[in-house]
Amino acid sequence: TRISAGLRHAIDRGELAVHYQPVVELPSARIVAVEALLRWTPAGGPVPPLDFIPVAEETGMIVPIGAWVLDQACRDAKAWHDRHGASLTVNVSVRQLAEPGFAEQVLRTLARTGLPASALVLEITESVFVGVADDAAPLLAALDGLREHGIRVAIDDFGTGYSSLSYLTQLPVDILKIDRSFVPADPADAAGGDHAFTRAVLQLGTSRQLPAIAEGIETQEQARLLHDLGCRLAQGYHFAKPGPVAHVEAAFLRLN
Ligand code: G
Ligand code: G
Ligand code: MN
Ligand code: NA
């Protein structure tokens, strides 16, 4: 396809860029981390991640592209960690995690860029952890190896993958990212049954010391509701949209 053909040259042609979206603490809205989000702009104009990332995964191109993202993001985040103590979260596909030598690659990147392991969070989508019992074992082992070095693991899009809450207690994870579909659009609407799930996840997080990040916070009311429910970390357009390095620097000046 056109996408897979174009992706093969995307790195060499300098068409890839990493944007960043702040993760903030509630209620202060100070930035405590940034999420790296890949952008691809070939000659014809930008292609949305939801269009090209699945193709990159199917073709295996996500392996070199993911390595490029990690390197770029660690270099950019080094300064934010030095100046503000901010962490970096990077999305990792199961295809990358399954690659032999992935853990070594991550450790080499940290050594090269000077970002400490304690400042790196790898985001894995919840689907990696469900319904793949046998094939999952080596992936979970790879995650555990990284965690032994102090790298943290977050479950992304949590709540969309149908894993039971109790199953969570067996997974090698440090952070839950509550998918934005579970954040009530209008907190004043008492019919919003979404509360129950969010509340349960936050309670589980408290009992197991698993911090949660609420995604997709678009209004002050949502931020207040999540804080009232006991959520300490949030991300969303209400605080800052994803943007290039200069955009993040401005957000640090505005919020920290
Ligand atoms: O930035 P945006 O909302 O358009 O991202 C859409 C999806 O693309 C998100 O689910 C996100 O996890 C995924 N994504 C963004 N950047 C990367 C990346 O560098 N690697 C992988 N594997 N997924 C990414
Ligand atoms: O799957 P993942 O959580 O990695 O996807 C992150 C995506 O969510 C990014 O593409 C980003 O652009 C998008 N995003 C971030 N904040 C908001 C928000 O407040 N509202 C909506 N609708 N999307 C958001
Ligand atoms: Mn993510
Ligand atoms: Na998500």
Image: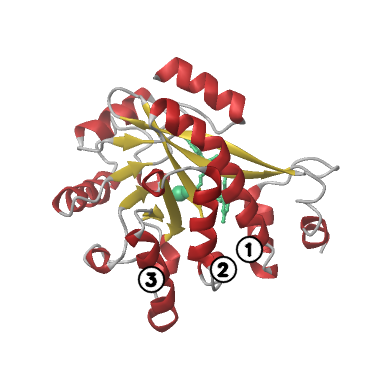
**Which sits in the foreground, 149 or 70?**
149
Q: Which mark is residue 89?
A: none
Q: Which mark is residue 140?
A: 3
Tell me how far mark 3 sits from mark 1, CA to CA. Answer: 18 Å
**Which sits in the foreground, 132 or 180?**
132
Q: Is residue 9 above or below residue 225?
A: below
- Image spot of residue 177 (x, y percent): 37, 48
Q: Earlier in the sequence, mark 3 or mark 1?
A: 1
Q: Nearer the viewer, mark 1 or mark 2?
A: 1
Tell me how far mark 2 sits from mark 3, CA to CA. Answer: 13 Å
Q: Amino acid at mark 3?
A: Leu
Q: Do the CB atoms of the residues marked 1 and 2 lie less than 8 Å apart?
A: yes
- Image spot of residue 182 (x, y percent): 35, 46
Dot 2 corresponds to which residue?
95
- Image spot of residue 186 (x, y percent): 35, 32
Left or right side of 60 for 158: left
Dot 1 corresponds to which residue?
63
Residue at 80% in and 51% down: 12
Quadrant placement of the N terminus: bottom right
Left or right side of 216 for 148: left
Classify mark 3: helix, strand or loop: helix
Q: Is residue 132 visible?
A: no
Quadrant placement of the C terminus: top left
At label 1, counting other C-alpha atoms closer than 10 Å, the crowd grade (few under 14, some 14-19, many 20 or more) is many
Q: Residue furthest top?
A: 254
Q: Amino acid at mark 2?
A: Arg
- Image spot of residue 118 (x, y percent): 36, 46
Q: Amino acid at mark 1?
A: Val
